Image (cartoon, rainbow, N blue to C red):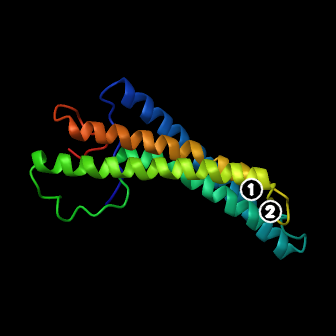
Amino acid sequence: MGIPHDLVEHDKVEHYLIMAGKAMAISGGMLFIALIAMSLVSIIGRKLGFGSVNGDIELMQAGTAVAATAFLPYCTLLGEHIKVDFFTENMRDSLKRPIDGVAEVLFAIVSGILVWRTILSAIATYESQEVTTLVSLPLWIPTALLVPGLFLMAVCAIYRAYAHFHPTKNIPGAHK
């Protein structure tokens, strides 16, 4: 725990993954700031008697999901997801790398399943024309906006798995 470390690029692929991950994280942060501003306008307007932003809770729910998903690729590159490394933290690197590599492969598989199922969910909500109650926001839009973050997270997990299985390769986000 502590202050997050910076990623140091080791090759061109990692460079582009870091750039894409940072861009997504910044866009997620900007979306969070916009949601906070909307929430403040809604709360202050309600307290001053002007009324709240129509559908503010619906917009907050959809926007928060999209913004949070935008942080996942960068977190994956940093290797900062919640993980249980109690048993492997003091292992030799020659034992730890393959175990962590298997964990990254499993994470990539789960990420791929999330991408696949989220795409299917977006298609289903598009076909059913499901919308939110107050502002009639089509639900397929925020659902589809989850896909880029999930997809890039899967790509980053695949890259980290690749790095773990190649002893000469530096692991992105590794603490040295």
Amino acid found under the numbered disc labelled 2: Thr
| Residues marked 2 and 1 touching at CB (< 8 Å) | yes
Q: Position of residue 53 (x, y in %)?
A: 83, 64
Q: Which residue is mark 1?
A: 139
The quarter of the picture where the C terminus appears is top left
**Residue 72 in view of the camera:** no
Does dot 1 land on a helix, a strand or a loop?
Answer: loop
Closer-to-camera residue (155/60):
155
Query: What residue is drawn where x is 83% and y is 66%?
Result: 133
The residue at the far right in this view is 50
Q: Earlier in the sequence, mark 2 or mark 1?
A: 2
Does dot 2 land on a helix, a strand or a loop?
Answer: loop
- Asked if residue 150 lies left or right of residue 56, the reply is left
The quarter of the picture where the N terminus appears is bottom left
Amino acid found under the numbered disc labelled 1: Leu
The residue at the far top in this view is 12
